[in-house]
Image: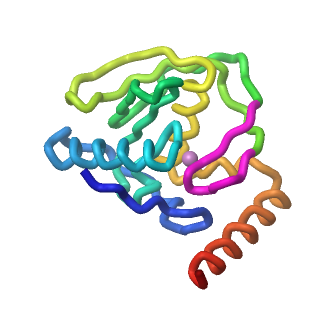
Amino acid sequence: MAKLNILRYPDPRLYTVAKAVTQVDARIRQLVDDMLESMYDAEGVGLAATQVDVHERVIVMDTSELRDQPIVLINPELIARSEEMTFGDEGCLSVPAIYDRVHRHARVTARALGRDGELHEFEAEGLLSVCVQHEMDHLIGKVFVEYLSPLKRDRIRTKMLKKARDDERD
Ligand code: NI
């Protein structure tokens, strides 16, 4: 297994639209394992392949308290979304230390291939529902800060660029 480098906003590669996975083979299983290791290491609840500069439709998540219930979504699709919405704080491993509120569907039903290559369908609510929507946005090149006002987004962009410069100097 290997830890992968996570792209930081506003890296333009984060705006890439991911392609469908054609076959869940050894290469994809390795990617999944490396993404899980990277997500746990960074203490995140979700990671999309886009964030590690691989532009294929792969997501890993774990919203469990004990961090022992990995979820793998390959070629995910939302087949139902609740009318009811939630509005809660979100963060992202590509935008460290920034949290802000985003509107999301309270419940979603998703269908995806698992690490086993089999099609699975599941309903999600609460944090898991928000996480599925957040990670699926990454696969279409969308970072959560795109939902914020242009003013807030500019501030975050400036802050992130400054942090990147400071990190480089260290
Ligand atoms: Ni994210």
Front-most of 83 and 168? 168
Residue 3 visible, this orientation: yes
Magenta segment includes 69: no
Residue at left offset 51%, top offset 40%: 135
Please state the extent of the stretch shown in magenta in the rendering.
88-99
Q: Position of residue 1 (x, y in %)?
A: 24, 50
Residue at left offset 33%, top offset 36%: 74
| Residue 114: quadrant of the picture | top left
Q: Position of residue 155 (x, y in %)?
A: 80, 64
Residue at left offset 73%, top offset 46%: 99
Residue placed furthest toward the left: 26
Residue 136 visible, this orientation: no
| 1 vs 113: above or below | below
| 158 vs 168: above or below | above
Position of residue 111 in the picture relative to residue 137 (left or right): left
Q: Position of residue 66 (x, y in %)?
A: 48, 25
Position of residue 163 in the picture relative to residue 68 (left or right): right
| Residue 101: quadrant of the picture | top right
